[in-house]
Image (tube, helix red, strand yellow):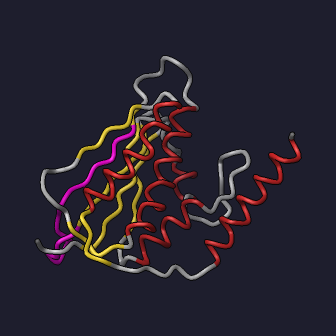
């Protein structure tokens, strides 16, 4: 019934709010980021496919270590993947490929400190600059029934890992979220 749906929606918003309002406590352990992303792809791939989205994993061979709370990091990346799939699913039929790419890589920051990059890239409709400017603002949403807390929560999780999140997007060209975390030298 519509009442049940509305109740579920409100419960979801409340859950989002409480997790956003609470302190993010991370339990950091040296973890292979490729493994985390691969597990996420296995878990979320079928759901993406049901929405007509092809999901690809682009990871270098070997391990890619960082100090992370794997469960929280997965939650953050799942938020990004869900947003991408929703954007891709909203595209009119025949407007090009609907792809979601999870890409990991090793790099260095400006001080030559090792970092790990995780990118969530989609071939979706992209975002206008005015939407991009507000993306991480709590309660800002472009989705009917959205709480506007998914991306702010994702950002808080990434920052609790002493990382950062950036987004590059262009209308008609898709969106690329880049999560950069302090890496661990193998």
Q: Is residue 108 magenta?
A: yes
Quarter of the rendering occupied by the N terminus: top right
Residue at image x 55%, y 32%?
89
Q: Is residue 160 left or right of residue 152?
A: left
Quarter of the rendering occupied by the C terminus: bottom left
Q: Is residue 139 magenta?
A: no
Depth check, front residue: 151 or 40: 40
Report the predominant secondary structure element of the magenta stretch.
strand
In the displayed structure, would residue 133 be above or below residue 49? below
Give the image location of residue 59, x and y in percent: 21, 49
Depth check, front residue: 60 or 97: 60
Give the image location of residue 77, x and y in percent: 43, 57
Give the image location of residue 100, x and y in percent: 39, 39
Residue at image x 31%, y 57%?
118
Depth check, front residue: 73 or 107: 73
Write the start and end of the magenta stretch as one range: 100-115
Residue at image x 54%, y 39%?
87
Depth check, front residue: 139 or 170: 139
Q: For residue 117, what is the image quadrant? A: bottom left
Give the image location of residue 22, x and y in percent: 61, 80
């Amino acid at each position: 019934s519509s009442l049940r749906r509305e109740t579920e929606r409100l419960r979801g918003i409340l859950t989002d709010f409480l997790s956003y309002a609470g302190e993010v406590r991370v339990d950091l352990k040296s973890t292979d980021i490729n493994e985390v992303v691969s597990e996420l792809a296995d878990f979320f791939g079928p759901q993406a496919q049901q929405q007509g989205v092809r999901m690809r994993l682009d990871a270098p061979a070997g391990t890619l270590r960082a100090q992370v709370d794997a469960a929280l990091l997965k939650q953050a990346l799942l938020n990004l993947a869900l947003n991408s799939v929703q954007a891709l699913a909203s595209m009119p039929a025949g407007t090009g490929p609907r792809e979601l790419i999870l890409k990991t890589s090793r790099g260095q920051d400006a001080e030559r400190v090792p970092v790990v990059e995780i990118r969530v890239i989609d071939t979706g409709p992209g975002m206008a600059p005015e939407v991009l400017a507000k993306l991480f603002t709590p309660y800002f949403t472009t989705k009917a029934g959205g709480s506007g807390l998914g991306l702010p929560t994702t950002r808080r999780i990434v920052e609790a890992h002493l990382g950062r999140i950036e987004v590059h997007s262009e209308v008609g060209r898709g969106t690329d979220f880049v999560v950069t975390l302090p890496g661990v030298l193998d």
